[in-house]
Image (tube, helix red, strand yellow):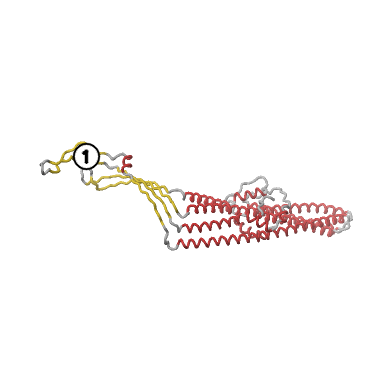
Amino acid sequence: MKSNMIIKSLRTVFPLVILFLGTATAQAQTEPWTLKSAVIHALENNIQIRQAHLSTLDAQAAKSEAIGGFLPNVNIGANHSWNIGLNQNITTGLLEDVTTQFTNASVSVGVDLYRGGQNVLQLLRANLVLLASQYQIEDMKEDVALFVANGYLQAVFSREAVGIEQAQLELTKVELQRTEEQVQAGVLPEGDLFEMQAVLASQEQQLVVAQNQYTMAKLSLAQLLLIQDYENFEIAEEDFAVGGQEILVQRTTDLVARALDYRNDIKLALTNIDIAKTDLRLAKSISKPNLSGFYSYSSRISYADRLEQTNTFDLVEVGVVESTGQSVVRPIYDQRVVAALPIEDQLKLNDGHNFGLSLNIPVLNGLSVKNNIERSKINVERSEFQYKQQVLDLENSINQAFNDSKGAQQAFVAAQKTLDARSKAYTYAQSRFEAGAATAFEFSQAKLQFESAESAWLRAKYDFIFKIKILELYFGIPITDL
């Protein structure tokens, strides 16, 4: 049932899908699982998607950091020191072992006035990285949903195959009973009874095989969803009718144009180009001059005692006037030891201010700036090539999906016609067998061909449904809209 163009994608996604909760297990669900509930459960618990969400949180933190680049840098500093050792005693003037304490405090502010536009570019880049992480998550969700839908449809197909085998088995039992009655009545030879018994045994075997395939399909789906209660795991009775054929009347060019606007992997590739171009602008901005402003305020506090001048004084002769012989005196005030000034007063007396501008002009930095610019240019070209390759791959995938869907449609129509014809042939053979005009072998052959046509029709139906769904994904229709 898998489309060839999606096999490579599914193989890539498979390791991502099976890692749902690590050691955790899904909670038991009492009601049968619908396709929608299975897909939702997968999207909520897939480990790779959860890790991608962490990348989104990291991108949000980077954006916050880029916004912070527009804000000034403010720092507050303080230190307290003890000076223990030989110092002069201010009272006696002698050297003594004393302990003095000092406190220093400062506040500094720095602001970028011009950095070549780096702050703006870093914010732009952070926004682009955040957008890219969101596109990546959505792209992963589409892959996981497609993988789960494929497993779910396999289980539904297997269940319907069991229903067909059971219905055929019941018909065979009825025909066997009728054959026994006709053999006992002498209408049919005993060989016809043996033939019908062989047909019954074959169909019982086919039923066992179909039931086993259904069990394995459910088991695979349950393991995909990390459901441990395998015995109670059931899928809902949903009718998946063949639909969506109107998309086949679209031109592939229209599908490609729609996919280029819708597909998250294309959006991601375009965003990566924008990121690379922004990195190039950042690399160039580093070669431009940087101008910043700064301001700082500081003050100092001492806890040591101090000498304070009193109002009493002594007059001391310092000289004599030669002409008059009068003494020249000056007052020598007495001093006393007092405690340190209050902290508020010291902060005012000892404060200081420092401010200015700082200009940095890059001249030669080991050619690192030049080489970074060249590397950024290469990354831009690489991203553009990756985008072009992504578009080519998308066009090829859509063309292949379109052709696969067309082929599946034709196969389904042919299978429907074959089933109708085989059904009529079976009904005719049954009436002839019951009338004794046909042997049991002829009847069993008609029945076998009818059963084969019914199985082929069922396979063609779900193959068509899945391939149409793949094509619809490129057109933006959710996987759960079946």
Give percent across and percent down for residue 456. 75, 57
The quarter holding residue 247 reads bottom right
Q: Nearer the viewer, residue 186 or 216?
A: 216
Can residue 452 be seen in this snapshot?
Answer: no
Farthest residue, direction front: 323
Give percent across and percent down for residue 281. 50, 57
Q: Horizontal placement of 50 versus 160: left or right?
A: left
Give, as a three-letter code, the residue at label 1.
Gln
Element marked by disc 1: strand
Q: Horizontal placement of 221 versus 374: left or right?
A: right
Q: Nearer the viewer, residue 22 or 2?
A: 2
Q: Residues within 10 Å of mark 1 (few under 14, many from 20)?
A: some
Q: Which quarter of the image is occupied by the N terminus?
A: bottom right
The quarter holding residue 404 reads bottom right
Q: Nearer the viewer, residue 220 or 339?
A: 339
Instruction: Please determine whether, in this image, residue 472 is positioned above or below residue 306.
Output: below
Instruction: Please determine whether, in this image, residue 52 is positioned above or below residue 89.
Output: below
The quarter holding residue 99 reads top left
Farthest residue, direction top: 311
Give percent across and percent down for residue 304. 28, 42
How many numbered marks does the figure carry?
1
Q: Which residue is mark 1?
A: 335
Q: Nearer the viewer, residue 408 or 350?
A: 350
Give percent across and percent down for residue 180. 85, 54
Can residue 24 be seen in this snapshot?
Answer: yes
